[in-house]
Amino acid sequence: MRTAFYISDGTGITSEVFGHALLSLFEAEFDHVTIPFVETALKAEQAKQRINDRYKTTGVRPLVFLTFVDEQLRAIINSSEGVCYDFLNAFVDPMQKELGIPAKPKTHRTHSIHEKTYDFRIDAVNYALANDDGANLKDYAKADIILVGVSRSGKTPTSLYLALQYGIKAANYPFVEEDMDSLSLPAALRPHRNKLFGLTITPERLSQIREQRRPGSRYASLRQCKLELDEVENLYQKERVPFLNSTTLSIEEISAKIMAETGLKRQKY
Amino acid sequence: MRTAFYISDGTGITSEVFGHALLSLFEAEFDHVTIPFVETALKAEQAKQRINDRYKTTGVRPLVFLTFVDEQLRAIINSSEGVCYDFLNAFVDPMQKELGIPAKPKTHRTHSIHEKTYDFRIDAVNYALANDDGANLKDYAKADIILVGVSRSGKTPTSLYLALQYGIKAANYPFVEEDMDSLSLPAALRPHRNKLFGLTITPERLSQIREQRRPGSRYASLRQCKLELDEVENLYQKERVPFLNSTTLSIEEISAKIMAETGLKRQKY
């Protein structure tokens, strides 16, 4: 099996995202190895040695996805036996020409505590946790968005992803049976109607997810799931709450769709 | 101000990560616009129109970071007035030659529910929430790692990031004063000693963070923070718990360091 190395003087996250996206276009299996924080010549030589050793033992040249700020460290990795993809560097020259200013590489420019938006993101994570699952009805004025939906429709992981990725303060509120019986919005949500975003899901998938949590329960039964989802979708329509069906979507996809549909301003790029 | 567009037939996350990493090398401000899920010719034409309109109103050509699987949609964006950076596509040919197999692009290959590791990541998020802040001492057998540290040293957001990014099941346990007085590991942690990873932080930064939470309290006082951190660092050393100082690190950096130091096998690339 071919080895893919992700090597960086930072976290390696940018290399991983790029390398993963590129390799996902090919129907092949890879052995993935990340070596982050390669910040000294010694560490770079050690990383080079690992690449070369892997070449020796497998007989195929490893793929190496690298991002480096330091020229000397970059050169050490590029002198290895790996096939090096220095994807960021490849675009620096054209971008310099287009912008008419020189690049000023600094380490830890991305994924660092020094990013302007870092504190927003941590505040948003804390907000999501404090306002998860209807735990707190008093802080909705501070929410950027309030996700609503039946239990286990994907609200919590989506709230956390919105916080971590975009710095968005997302509360979430689970509809319980009393809310649905009266087919109207709970009092706590009414003043924040313009921040509501609904999630729905197919009854089959919801039942499957709930079965894992409480096997054989009424809560997990297809009949109950169908009933709740019908009521909640009626409520969305009646109250004109925008909503989407999360059944086949990842939390990344749900979040990206919510951002696009609501026009919320993210705190991070 | 120059506009940077991130356009994709998927979530746009890959374009954002790449574009952000590239632009962070330049000392300039940009106006960022993401257009995800451009899955039809109509949507592509609308996106092209937005790029062209922006050129008209600002007088400078927008930068366009794009990832497309569909050739026709890609061509529509490339025919806009923007300066297009089709960074993934630029590497497909060399990678095809190196691997000796053709690329088979499919939409939603990354950041999708169909990724093999998606369920691991959602399970890990649920695990992190259920085992946050010492809430549950009985499920540590299922943990991949147990983060320990004093209150507000960064355990919770790090646990969530490890779950979302790497599919790692991270519990976290906050040391309280009784744990530290006796300078020994709490009983619940002892059987899982090999999974422990400690966080520490400078007393000044900890006091600052705690002040936001409970202003003027003993809990937030520099004296109390110093005391707790001294004790906890002694405990790490005595019990040989690996640890790192999170003061100047982002949760991405803490997580990447933990992954590298522990050799934990991630569930996602």
Image: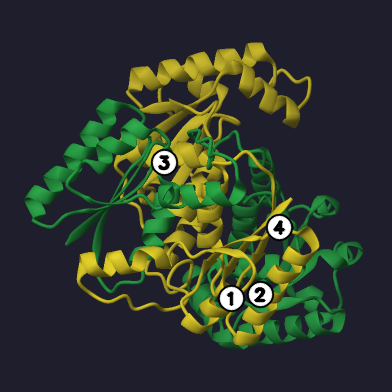
Chain colours: A yellow, B green
B206, above or below B101, in the image:
below
> At label 1, which amino acid type do we have?
Ser
Q: Position of residue A105 (x, y in %)?
A: 39, 77
Sooner in the amino-acid sequence: mark 3 or mark 1: 1
Q: Which mark is residue A256?
A: 3
Q: Are marks 4 and 3 in contact (CB under 8 Å)?
A: no
Q: Are marks 4 and 1 in contact (CB under 8 Å)?
A: no
**CA neighbours of label 3 inside 10 A, class few (<14), some (14 to 19), many (20+):** many
When asked about the image quadrant of residue B181, the answer is: bottom right
Mark 3 against mark 2, which lies toward the viewer? 2
Give the letter of the chain under mark 4. A
Give the letter of the chain under mark 3. A
Sooner in the amino-acid sequence: mark 3 or mark 2: 2
Q: Which mark is residue A79?
A: 1
Query: For the residues marked 3 and 2, what is the alpha-carbon distance in whole angstroms?
Result: 38 Å
Sooner in the amino-acid sequence: mark 2 or mark 4: 2
